[in-house]
Structures are given as C-alpha cells and as structure tokens.
Amino acid sequence: MTKTFGGVTALDKVDFSVAPGRIAGLIGPNGAGKSTFFNVLTGVLPGNGGEIRFDGKRLNGLQPHARVRLGMVRTFQKIHPFHGMTVLESVMVGCHTRGGAGMLSAMLRLPAVKAEERRFREAAEAALAFVGLGRQAQAPADALPLGHQRLLQIACGLVTDPRVMLLDEPASGLDANETARLADLLIAIRAQGKTLVLVEHDMSLVMKICDQITVLSFGRRLANGSPDEVRRNPKVIEAYLGS
Ligand code: ADP
Ligand code: MG
C-alpha cells in the first residue's frame, strides 16, 4: 500500500497481512504512517497504489460503510461519545450499519422495525456484557470514565459482528489494571475467531498479546515477525532508541 500527501510519502509500498483469528500489532514512532494505514485500509482516504484484499475480495474503491458491511470495523484514537445517549443506545446505533430496515421505516415504527429493534437491543446488551459494561447500560455515554469509554468503543465495533477489528491505541490513557483487563478482552475476542489489528504505543501490551508485529518507520516497513523476532531486530532497536 502506498499513500502520498503532496510531496510527503506517508506509506511507501507497505506490505501487510494477517491470518484470520490472529492479533497483529502495528507499531512505529510518531508520524510513521500507522493512522494513515488504517485510513486507507478502511476507505477513509484513497490510496495511491497497491491492493487491499479482504477474504479474497478486492476492497480498493469501496466506500467505508461497504467495508464495515463486509466485516471490517475500526475504533479511533480520539473518543467521540454520543452526547445525550445512554451507553446502550450508543451501541445500538452501531447495529444500524448492519440492519436491514432503513431510516424511513424506523421513523414510521413498522412492526418489522420493532422486531429488529428488539434484536438490536439484545445484541447491544450482549456486546456490553461481553466487554464488562453490563451495569453501565443506562448511564449517559459521555459521563463514562476514559477506561470505560475505550470499552464502549470496542462494544460498538463488536455489535456489528465484525471479522476484523482495527484498534487505534485502545490502551492510551488506561492505567495498569485497565490495560490488563483490556488485554484479557482482546484475547477473548481472538478466541471467538475474530482478527485484530492493533496500533498501540504500550509495548508490553503489544509484546504480550500479539501473534505478529509489523514495525513502520517513515512510511516504510522496517520489520515484521513474531514479538521475539521484532524485539531482537537491530533496526527496530535503532529506530526506537536512536531517534
Ligand atoms: P502515525 O499515526 O504513525 O503517528 P500518521 O499516519 O498520522 O502517523 O502520519 C504519517 C505522515 O503522514 C506524517 O508525516 C503526517 O504528517 C502525514 N499525514 C497524515 N495525514 C495527513 C493528511 N491528512 N494530510 C497531510 N499529511 C498527512
Ligand atoms: Mg496515529
């Protein structure tokens, strides 16, 4: 994958792949191209070259929502809670990306919509219970502490029943206990057969839960391999310590 911004090459022929049911880590210094990689992968930004394949299908040119429908969801580094909604309602909004009934029938409250809404509610409650926010379902979403906001983001992604989740710094701002619980949660998601791609600065979290790690530096792939291989790679040590 290649992405340029004017004269800046943010991603220079970056090769990346992850097998189903694995956790891949994507690391690198600030400005390395990690967020740009997610933006091109999810269709938020067009790429300038290369091919994106997901389960044998070519994704290039597909709109972001079409990629979500195929099973690729992401969370953002910055949190944007839904103001005026409860935690449960916030997760139910996510259901609509996969639901059948449109906005109009939702407003008319047709019987089919009521049944669908019941399904959405049950799916949202299940997702909240899974991430450990079952008791916060009726709380205002924007009043949650940061650690719970991060879990809410994950629940919003999970409710669409994705096959791949792209997580942008899910541990940022979390304390050691919250990070440990996040690690358990991500491992539980992997155990369901889902694939995770993790952009994360917390190296001990990355080393602990990732099956493979890709290191970016100045838009290029510097290294790729198991946590042990990456940890011992002299180029990686230099990129992190020599800068
Ligand atoms: P990371 O997430 O690894 O910190 P980014 O992907 O945000 O890095 O940025 C990679 C490079 O691309 C940086 O040089 C950044 O300034 C540039 N960049 C990212 N997004 C844009 C944009 N929308 N317009 C112009 N330059 C951008
Ligand atoms: Mg970034």
Image: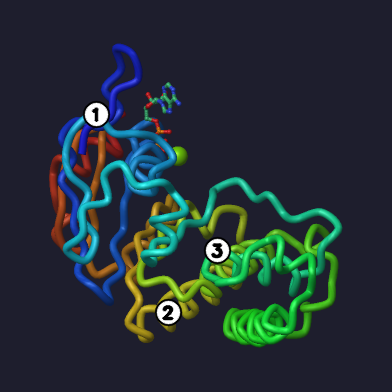
Whether residue 227 is visible, yes or no, is no
Per the image, label 2 sits on a secondary structure element best described as helix
Q: Amino acid at mark 3?
A: Thr
Q: Nearer the viewer, residue 127 or 115?
A: 115
- Between disc 3 and disc 1, the foreground one is 3
Ligand 2: quadrant of the figure: top left
Is the C-beta separation of discs 3 and 1 under 8 Å? no
N-terminal-most mark, 1 or 2: 1
Give the secondary structure at mark 1. Answer: loop
Q: Which residue shows up at 40% across the image and 41% down it?
A: 39
Residue pointed to by mark 2: 189
Task: Check disc 3 and report the residue beneath it.
Answer: 97
* Residue at x 63% of width, y 64% of height: 102
Q: Tell me if 81 is positioned left or right of 179 in this view.
A: right
Q: Quadrant of residue 107?
A: bottom right
Residue type at numbered disc 1: Asn
In the rendered image of this protein, does residue 124 appear above or below residue 213? below
The percent position of residue 51, horizontal first and vertical second, equals: 17, 44
